[in-house]
Image (cartoon, rainbow, N blue to C red):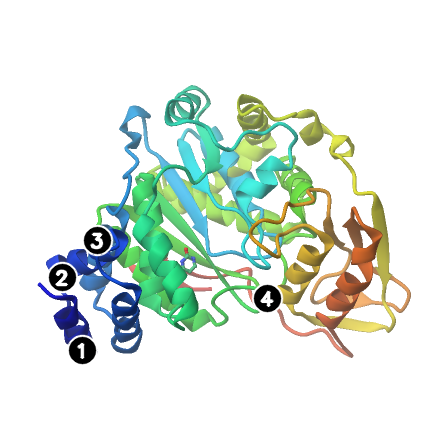
């Protein structure tokens, strides 16, 4: 077999066989196939696309390029979730304990922040003492004992994706549904759970900007799951405005606790219930309605909050910050941003709001940057709200006062005011399952 022929076949619109995909992906991962040939193949895929089966096979080959985590040492059904990334997206910290409190095991590997979006592992590390790099045995033992562990990606998970993603990033081949779907799902298949719920964010703060492209991506990922023997469903959720009010690591942990105590912001609470209900449904816990009720009861009874505390305690975290966020290390400085004009907040450029939080220190500008866990933004107004001149729009937090001017300018530039409120999209726009697409 020659890489030249594989590239030519895809260039001419052919369908690659499993053997051809294996030859290309494994050869590239092992260093036998050079970057320039893989780049040509990626561009051919970008231009000619892939069939469902071809995408599923590519994903399976990428997943098998490294460790396939075997969760069979953990009893019961194991469920995972993945968000395509957003601003203020702290849903894992809410949903994972809800689902675990309802008896479904969570053995989850999460990521760190990327660009303007946050990551669960960074948020977890905001709780002082929390370990996110557990060895396999401790990870399995914890899940068997208390039903839940969330850790950072460990081991050699889908190394083909790592190399291919780095190449896509510099060859203008990122924005291609089969390539994005196989990249995300190769890591999820390798992580080993039986059920995978995908939260595909859509809107100006998301990777996918339109509902239609989000649905296409969700369909591709659900189909990969079906071809590879996993139960997969996706919700398409709004990221035209940040989720909840808090952006930044310890601020987001505190807001997650509020939801688990039954007094969180309405938008975040609703999205979390819908995601949790769908995860429980995939895990076979009953009808969607029964699963929603189960999730609500886990919050009302305090069981879900207890589960969150058990998880942090088992991973060495100081749970006193969960009981009282005043125990979190506090930011040295804060600045309140006041409205200069009256009107309705009709649009937030969510990506810019996320970038403002990065400027404050809540995210990384370079890979080596350390995060300031206390930095971030608390929004006092959100899209759709009426604002009077002089009212607080947000409070910014930072360790270094010098960060405020740039962040405030960016934050103000993210806001558009108008004379009348505008209709807002639904929080959950669609649900994609093996049976099809439901739009809300
Ligand atoms: N996230 C991934 O893991 N891969 C992509 O290609 C895009 C987003």
**Residue annotated with mark 3:** 26
Mark before the other along the chain sequence, 4 or 2: 2
Residue 13, numbered label = 1
- Toward the right, the furthest residue is 390
Helix, strand or loop status at disc 4: loop
Number of the front mark, 4 or 2 = 2
**Residue annotated with mark 4:** 240
Give the image quarter of residue 153.
Answer: top left
Mark before the other along the chain sequence, 2 or 3: 2
Number of the front mark, 1 or 4 = 1
Mark before the other along the chain sequence, 3 or 1: 1
**Residue annotated with mark 2:** 20
**Horizontal relation, residue 39 to residue 5: left or right:** right
Number of the front mark, 2 or 3 = 3
Q: Is residue 359 visible?
A: yes
Q: Can residue 433 be seen in this view?
A: no
Helix, strand or loop status at disc 2: helix
Mark 2–mark 1 Cα distance, whole angstroms, equals: 14 Å
Q: How crowded is mark 1: few (under 14 residues within 10 Å), some or many (20 or more)?
A: some
């Amino acid at each position: 077999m020659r890489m030249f022929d594989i590239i030519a076949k895809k260039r001419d619109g052919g369908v690659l066989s499993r053997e051809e995909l294996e030859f290309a992906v494994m050869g590239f991962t092992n260093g036998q196939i050079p970057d320039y040939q893989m780049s040509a193949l990626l561009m051919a895929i970008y231009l000619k696309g892939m069939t469902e089966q071809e995408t599923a096979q590519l994903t399976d080959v990428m997943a098998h390029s490294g460790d396939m985590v075997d969760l069979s040492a953990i009893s019961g059904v194991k469920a995972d979730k993945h968000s395509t990334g957003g601003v203020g997206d702290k849903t894992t910290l809410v949903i994972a304990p809800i689902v675990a409190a309802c008896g479904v095991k969570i053995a989850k590997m999460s990521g760190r922040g990327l660009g303007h979006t946050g990551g669960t592992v960074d948020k977890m590390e905001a709780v002082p003492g929390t370990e996110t790099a557990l060895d396999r045995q401790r990870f399995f033992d914890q899940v068997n004992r208390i039903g839940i562990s969330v850790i950072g990606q460990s081991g050699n998970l889908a190394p083909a994706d790592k190399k291919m993603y780095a190449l896509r990033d510099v060859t203008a081949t990122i924005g291609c549904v089969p390539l994005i779907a196989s990249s995300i799902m190769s890591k999820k298949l390798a992580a080993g759970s039986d059920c995978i719920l995908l939260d595909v964010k859509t809107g100006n703060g998301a990777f996918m900007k339109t509902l239609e492209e989000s649905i296409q991506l969700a369909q591709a990922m659900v189909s990969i799951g079906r071809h590879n023997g996993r139960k997969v469903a996706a919700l398409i959720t709004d990221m035209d405005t940040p989720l909840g009010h808090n952006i930044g690591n310890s601020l987001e942990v505190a807001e997650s606790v509020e939801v688990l105590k039954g007094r969180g912001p309405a938008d975040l609470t609703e999205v979390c219930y819908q995601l949790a209900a769908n995860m429980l449904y995939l895990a076979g816990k009953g009808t969607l309605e029964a699963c929603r009720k189960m999730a609500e009861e886990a919050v009302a009874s305090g069981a879900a909050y207890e589960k969150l505390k058990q998880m942090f305690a088992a991973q060495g975290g100081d749970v006193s910050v969960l009981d009282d966020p005043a125990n979190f290390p506090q930011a040295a400085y804060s600045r309140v941003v006041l409205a200069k004009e009256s009107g309705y907040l009709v649009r937030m450029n969510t990506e810019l709001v996320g970038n403002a939080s990065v400027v404050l220190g809540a995210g990384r500008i370079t890979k080596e940057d350390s995060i300031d866990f206390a930095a971030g933004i608390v929004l006092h107004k959100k899209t759709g709200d009426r604002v009077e001149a002089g009212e607080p729009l947000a409070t910014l937090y930072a360790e270094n006062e010098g960060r405020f001017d740039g962040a405030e300018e960016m934050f103000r530039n993210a806001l558009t005011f108008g004379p009348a409120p505008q209709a807002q999209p639904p929080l959950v726009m669609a649900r994609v399952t093996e049976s099809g697409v439901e739009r809300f």
